[in-house]
Image (spheres, grey):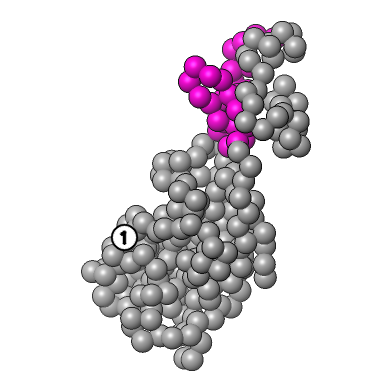
């Protein structure tokens, strides 16, 4: 039943903006119970394919706008959205100290002789949460990040204020995961919505100094993503 509905939703087998079959209709069609149908609908909603409206029923998600993603760490998220004329805003979620033993080898190298801070921003696109942007910054490079990090909306603007003008990246990695409870709340998504994770670094082009490691977590269900290298 889930595969049948999922296939029809993905391939636009149901009319846009029209209610999906009721629980009774599907129970009769598949010869099963309403409770089984309800569980299938709950799973599809957790996966981000449908939405429910109390008293009205279940509906396929609206057609998703396309966002182009540049797999580079030398272009700011706001610049990427601006180039595509996409309505966008950013909210600072936190600036917190990372445990000394946390993170992989790259984070430990970035920490150096200082402390490592995680600066998290929520990216809101077309008035819906689209991504979480985590920047990892060391006090060895930016001694005031603890005091200033909570007010940062754009790391690139922050680096410009510190005298850095041109940026480069050594490459990016793309992977897929699922949201933990905090990410579910911030991104307003279910636990079964796949997340696209883009990890990269940002360096000062002139000196080659490593400014940050970054991880951007994108919702996969609200948008279609066109990948640009």
Q: Position of residue 194 (x, y in %)?
A: 59, 45
For image coordinates 72% across by 28% down, the residue present is 14
Task: Name the quadrant of the N terminus.
Answer: top right
Tell me if 120 is positioned left or right of 30 in this view: left
For image coordinates 47% across by 47% down, the residue present is 128
For image coordinates 41% across by 58% down, the residue present is 89
Q: Is residue 111 visible?
A: no
Tell me if 97 is positioned left or right of 170 in this view: left
Q: Is residue 77 above or below residue 197?
A: below
Residue 52 included in the magenta stretch of the image = yes
Q: Position of residue 183 (x, y in %)?
A: 45, 46
Q: Classify residue 225 by image quadrant.
A: bottom right
Q: Residue reaching furthest left?
A: 147
The residue beneath circle 1 is 96
For image coordinates 26% across by 70% down, the residue present is 148
Tell me if 4 is positioned left or right of 133 in this view: right
Tell me if 43 is positioned left or right of 129 in this view: right
Q: Position of residue 174 (x, y in %)?
A: 62, 61
Magenta region, residue range: 32-61
Task: Name the quadrant of the C terminus.
Answer: bottom right
Mark 1 element type: strand
* Closest to the observer, 13 or 94: 13
* Closest to the observer, 66 or 136: 66
Q: Is residue 160 above or below residue 47?
A: below
Q: Is residue 3 above or below residue 130?
A: above
Q: Mark 1 Cα within 10 Å, few/some/many (few <14, many 20+)? A: some
Residue 28 included in the magenta stretch of the image = no
């Amino acid at each position: 039943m889930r595969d049948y509905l999922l296939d029809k939703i993905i391939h636009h087998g149901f009319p846009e903006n029209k209610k999906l079959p009721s629980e009774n209709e599907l129970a009769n069609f598949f010869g099963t119970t309403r409770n089984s149908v309800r569980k299938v609908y709950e799973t599809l909603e957790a996966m981000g394919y449908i939405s429910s409206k109390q008293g009205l029923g279940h509906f396929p998600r609206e057609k998703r706008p396309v966002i182009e993603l540049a797999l580079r760490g030398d272009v700011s998220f706001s610049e990427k959205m601006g180039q595509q004329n996409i309505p966008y805003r950013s909210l600072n979620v936190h600036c917190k100290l990372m445990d000394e033993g946390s993170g992989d080898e790259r984070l430990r190298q970035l920490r150096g002789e200082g402390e490592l801070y995680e600066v998290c921003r929520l990216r809101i696109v077309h008035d819906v949460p689209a991504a979480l942007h985590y920047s990892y910054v060391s006090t060895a490079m930016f001694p005031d990040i603890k005091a200033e990090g909570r007010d940062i909306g754009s790391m690139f603007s922050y680096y410009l204020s510190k005298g850095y003008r041109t940026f480069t990246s050594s490459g990016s990695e793309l992977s897929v995961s699922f949201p933990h409870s905090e990410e579910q709340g911030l991104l307003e998504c279910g636990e079964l919505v796949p997340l696209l994770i883009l990890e990269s670094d940002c360096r000062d082009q002139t000196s080659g100094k490593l400014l940050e490691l970054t991880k951007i977590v994108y919702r996969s269900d609200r948008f279609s993503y066109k990948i640009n290298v």
